[in-house]
Image: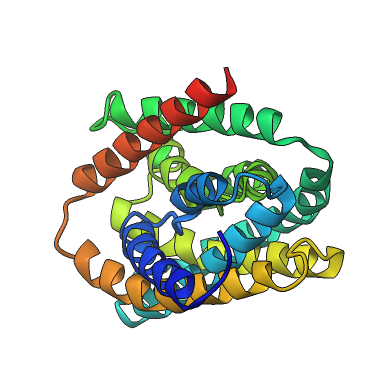
């Protein structure tokens, strides 16, 4: 797909949709965007796809975080700690993905998304007993989870919210709406770091990669505002179901191709 006015318009429209849905569920939209980019650009290496996706996720998460900040839904103390914990893994993953082929990349993504989707779609209304844990222990566990999230989510170019929201809700007892907002705040910091690492490595390639990222970013910034507003109208369980269904659908697609 060559880059022209029609391509730019299509990418802006895609960014609008991804930005709205990604912010709605606190996932940044990378778990949707990376699969779509893999379909649109079958000859691009994983490092270029993930670099473009993470740049758009950064724009989405930054815009969404601004909206959530106005709604006063972000837990900044937890968010700053969790964000710091993601950074080592996100930098290493941005470097490691350059050495992985597309088939292996798609197979790993399919397995990860299927596991996350299945987790969300089963026992939706029951939360882990850690809900009553002392604040200090919750923060420590959250930091440990975030360390792994930083690597896996950056490696796959899916941001991190798609993994962080379930962990915050299920394992740490955060209310869903606080989890989505705090996850977005963490995601803005993590994806920004990963995008900078990709840029330093030249992962965007020459020309088109950066233009694609900018077109997507223009769309997601606007879509993120709409998603944050819409999230106030949905119950927590509905948000979890949306996320679970989307993950399973994408996982099936990847596994079908890879296997």
Q: Position of residue 206 (x, y in %)?
A: 77, 70
Left or right of 191? Residue 247 is left
Q: Is residue 134 visible?
A: no
Q: Position of residue 111 (x, y in %)?
A: 54, 25
Q: Position of residue 174 (x, y in %)?
A: 38, 50
Comparing 137 with 158, the one in front is 158
- Kindly identify the residue that appears in the image at 40 percent across and 67 percent down: 10
Comparing 259 with 68, the one in front is 259
Image colouring: rainbow
Comparing 69 with 196, the one in front is 196
- Kindly identify the residue that appears in the image at 60 percent across and 67 percent down: 55
Instruction: Name the image quarter holding residue 189.
Output: bottom right
Left or right of 216? Residue 149 is right
188 to 118, vertically: above or below = below
Q: Can you name the residue that lies furthest to the top here? A: 259
226 to 184, vertically: above or below = below
Q: Can you name the residue that lies furthest to the left here? A: 233
Left or right of 106? Residue 5 is left
231 to 35, vertically: above or below = below
Locate the C terminus and report the quarter of the image it occupies: top right
Q: Is residue 177 visible?
A: yes
Locate the N terminus and report the quarter of the image it occupies: bottom right
- Kindly identify the residue that appears in the image at 56 percent across and 76 percent down: 214
Q: Position of residue 139 (x, y in %)?
A: 57, 51
**Total tally of numbered discs in the picture:** 0
Instruction: Name the image quarter holding residue 131.
Output: top left
């Amino acid at each position: 797909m060559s880059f022209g006015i029609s391509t730019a318009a299509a990418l802006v429209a895609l960014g609008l949709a991804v930005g709205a849905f990604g912010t709605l569920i606190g996932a940044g939209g990378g778990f949707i965007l990376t699969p779509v980019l893999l379909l649109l650009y079958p000859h691009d290496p994983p490092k270029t796809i993930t670099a473009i996706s993470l740049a758009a996720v950064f724009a989405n998460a930054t815009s969404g975080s601004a909206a959530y900040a106005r709604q006063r839904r972000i837990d900044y103390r937890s968010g700053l700690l969790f964000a710091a914990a993601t950074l080592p893994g996100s930098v290493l993953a941005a470097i490691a993905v350059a050495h992985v082929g597309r088939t292996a990349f798609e197979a790993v993504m399919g397995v990860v998304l299927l596991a996350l989707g299945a987790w969300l779609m089963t026992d939706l209304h029951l939360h882990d007993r850690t809900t009553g844990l002392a604040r200090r222990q919750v923060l420590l566990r959250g930091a440990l989870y975030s360390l792994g999230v930083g690597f896996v989510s950056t490696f796959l170019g899916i941001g991190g919210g798609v993994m962080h929201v379930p962990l915050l809700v299920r394992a740490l007892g955060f209310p869903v709406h606080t989890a989505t907002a705090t996850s977005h705040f963490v995601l803005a910091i993590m994806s920004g770091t990963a995008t900078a690492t990709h840029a330093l490595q030249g992962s965007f390639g020459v020309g088109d990669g950066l233009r694609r990222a900018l077109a997507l970013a223009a769309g997601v910034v606007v879509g993120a505002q709409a998603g944050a507003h819409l999230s106030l109208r949905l119950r927590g369980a509905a948000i979890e179901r949306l996320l679970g269904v989307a993950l399973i659908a994408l996982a099936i697609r990847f596994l079908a191709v890879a296997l």
